[in-house]
Image (spheres, helix red, strand yellow):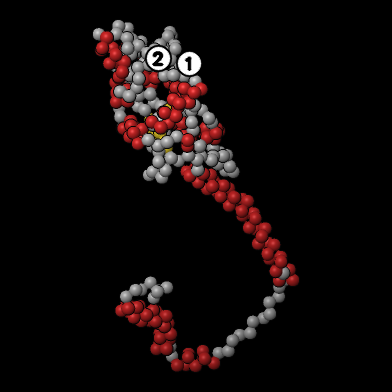
Amino acid sequence: KFLIATLDPSDILLNAIALAFVLDIDELIYNILAPQRCKSVLEQTEALPMPESRRLWWMNSTMLKISVITVLLLIAYFHGVEGVHARMSQAKDILCSGELDFVYTINPATGIVQAAKSEPDTGVLLREDDQLAVLELAKPSIARVDGWNVSWRAVNATKSDARLARVAIGLIDLTSHLTTYQATGKIEYKQLQDLHADTTVLSELSGLSKSTVGDAAEHEVCRDSPKSSWAEHRLLKVTAGHHENCTHVASWPYNWCGMMNKTSIRSLCPISCGCHDEWEPAAGFYASSSFGCSAACEKSLRASM
């Protein structure tokens, strides 16, 4: 290997000489420094006879040796290797299985995960709710296996048909939705793998990931969010389980719209929070796009003044 790794002919010659020196150095030292008497004694020394080994009969049994080795290997596998292999397989499934061709970001105004279909092979730590939303989209193969107690919420999220993320669709899928709605009167929600990638949607999502609350409010419409799983989940989260729709978010005893840190509510429920109200908005001082109110409501308000 030492000589094979050498490419230059001159280096091969030098390395061959160096290798011969290393291999023969002990013999050269012995021939030069050892006394002649020691050399003669060593040459005339005969080999010592070794007594015959006395082993028990079962120690010479090949089948017994094989059986012992097999048992030891099985013990090592079930007590060590199996658990490690299962965890490695689970890690591979989490990283590589399921739907991979999508991108997502978190809307700074609503606090909702927004996603879009991407082209195949496109090259942060999240809050728990955001992780569940992404898991629902990706649907990787996750299970509670030996030595790895995965959260049941994470396992159930990969099997859920609900959608905690707000998925943006392109022109092709929008046309398909409108055609279906005109024919049946119902809106068909497709799975992520059935959608088409749209460069415009991907560009908007990329910009949203870097935007401020005010920038995100520019893209929101001036109406309360429709009934949907992602809106209900987010409202339940930010109202501590009190409301799943916009109907009573500004009602007594809690005016959620008027709380400074409730940007998500004002963004999801601009009408209920009075973002369009000129005189007494429920959001009070925070009835502006900088605090989550839709910019479209501000424009409508200015047009009416």
Which element carries disc 1, helix, strand or loop? loop
Residue 133 pos. (x, y %): 46, 31
In the image, taking residue 160 as reference, residue 35 lies left or right, namely left
Kindly report the distance in space between the C-alpha atoms of the residues bearing marks 2 and 1.
10 Å
Q: Is residue 116 visible?
A: yes
Q: Amino acid at mark 1?
A: His
In the image, taking residue 248 as reference, residue 67 lies left or right, namely right
The residue most toward the top is 279
Q: Quadrant of residue 126?
A: top left
Please name the residue shown 58% across and 42% down the image. Answer: 145
Depth order, front residue of 133/61? 133
Q: Quadrant of residue 165?
A: top left
Which element carries disc 2, helix, strand or loop? helix
Q: Is residue 237 visible?
A: no
Which residue, given by chain and number where applicable, does mark 2 sit on? Answer: 256
Residue 84 pos. (x, y %): 55, 49
Disc number placed over residue 169 in the picture, else none: none
Question: Dot 1: within a 10 Å radius of its alpha carbon, few (fewer than 14), some, or many (20 or more) residues?
Answer: few
